[in-house]
Image: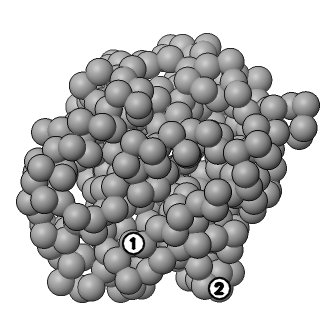
Amino acid sequence: MTLPKLQIGAKAARYCIVQGGMSIRIALHALVAAVANAGGIGTIGGMGISPAELRDEIRKTRKLTDGVFGVNLMYAGYLFDRLLEVCIEETVDFVAIGAGFARGPFQKLAAHGISALAIISSPKAARIVARTEGVTGVVVESGQAGGHLGPEDPNISTWDLFPPVLQTLREYNYGGPVIAAGGILHREDIDRALAMGADGVQMGIRFAMTEESAASPAMKQAWLTATGSQVEDWSPTGMASRAIVPHSPDLLPRVDDIKVHCVHCLKVCRHREDHSVSHCIHTALTNAQKGDVVNGLVFCGPRVGEIHDILPAGEIIRRLVGSPIQARGWDPAMV
Ligand SMILES: Cc1cc2nc3c(=O)[nH]c(=O)nc-3n(C[C@H](O)[C@H](O)[C@H](O)COP(=O)(O)O)c2cc1C
């Protein structure tokens, strides 16, 4: 069975597969364009980069594809407002906003005719976004996702979280597309999400582990050898997060290290308030992206151990859109 299209505002992608935004500098123009060219929807990770770098990434992506792509921004980010301005000035197809919520940015994007996705993790948030002007679509992200986690129960699966959130959205007459995220790797996962009523899926780690992803070879190797991930409570954001095992917070960089400077990446940072607490998340994620995984933070969900290869993003999409039988060939036997 062919996968359905996914409509985000005025734009429709050939397939209902969204590549989730991944900061810092994991999902940049090469990956985003490769996904969009293959018929999926690409998302630039807009957190932890400057407004000028974001503008450059948007323009580079646009040169490489006429497919659908947008930008992921974290509301908790210090530069959120300025990055949002860049998205508006560059008229991206959509902005996906997570890690905090306010109605203003959605209204602002709507006023400029730009679609917006709200990334949420609870029925409570569903009640709010359903009544917010400018929410073109909703991403429901479970505890099986990599990175920072929104659900009250950070271990809740997509299969347990998605149905009540969807039901709440529909009770509040929300009519936009609703996308499932967290732990979706194979074609059978996509089929299961669609059977639950999802209009599409958002996938992170499968696209982080591609040739076009801007993660360092060492980071890709760390994912390839990882058997799973664990929920941590030591992020300076105060949110739970998921990273590969083993990771020790003691090895993560701090601003009292002479080489680490605070770039004010977050509006509220526990580490900036008190250097003895937590670590510098910007440096930790940058270290991993550049190859120092020991002193870096390698985000991923619990199913990372099921991925055994680094493939071109287009090949991943081609395999996912094949029949369910072909998709089972994700197993090493076929790859
Ligand atoms: C390395 C990594 C970085 C991520 N960074 C972000 C981010 O900056 N903003 C965000 O909203 N989600 C982020 N995510 C979550 C993804 O966008 C996506 O929703 C999630 O990974 C889906 O789960 P999956 O990885 O199991 O497919 C990140 C995920 C990973 C693995």
Rendered view: 294 above or below 290: above
The disc placed on residue 8 is: 1
Q: Position of residue 78 (x, y in %)?
A: 28, 54
Disc 1 marks which amino acid?
Ile
Position of the C terminus, as image quadrant, is top right
Rendered view: 291 above or below 16: above
Instruction: Work out whether mark 2 precedes mark 1 in sequence or the reverse, and give the earlier one.
Output: 1
Q: Position of residue 22 (x, y in %)?
A: 52, 50
Q: Position of residue 289 (x, y in %)?
A: 64, 44
Between 249 and 133, the one nearer to me in the picture: 133
Between 236 and 228, the one nearer to me in the picture: 228
Q: Secondary structure at mark 1?
A: strand
Disc 2 marks which amino acid?
Lys
Between 118 and 64, the one nearer to me in the picture: 118
Task: Residue 72: tell me if it is visible.
Answer: yes
Rendered view: 189 above or below 45: above
Q: Position of residue 122 (x, y in %)?
A: 22, 37
Task: Say which residue appears at 39% left-offset and 20% top-offset.
Answer: 155
Residue 258 left/right relative to 76: right
| Label 1 Cα crowd, 10 Å radius (few <14 / some 14-19 / many 20+) | many
Task: Say which residue appears at 60% left-offset and 85% top-offset.
Answer: 66
Task: Say which residue appears at 45% left-offset and 45% top-offset.
Answer: 195
Q: Nearer the viewer, mark 2 or mark 1?
A: 1
The disc placed on residue 230 is: none
Q: Secondary structure at mark 2?
A: helix
Q: Which residue is mark 2?
A: 63
Q: Mark 1 near ligand 1 (CB under 8 Å)? A: no
Residue at mark 2 to residue at mark 1: CA–CA distance: 21 Å
Task: Say which residue appears at 48% left-offset and 77% top-offset.
Answer: 12
Position of the N terminus, as image quadrant, is bottom right
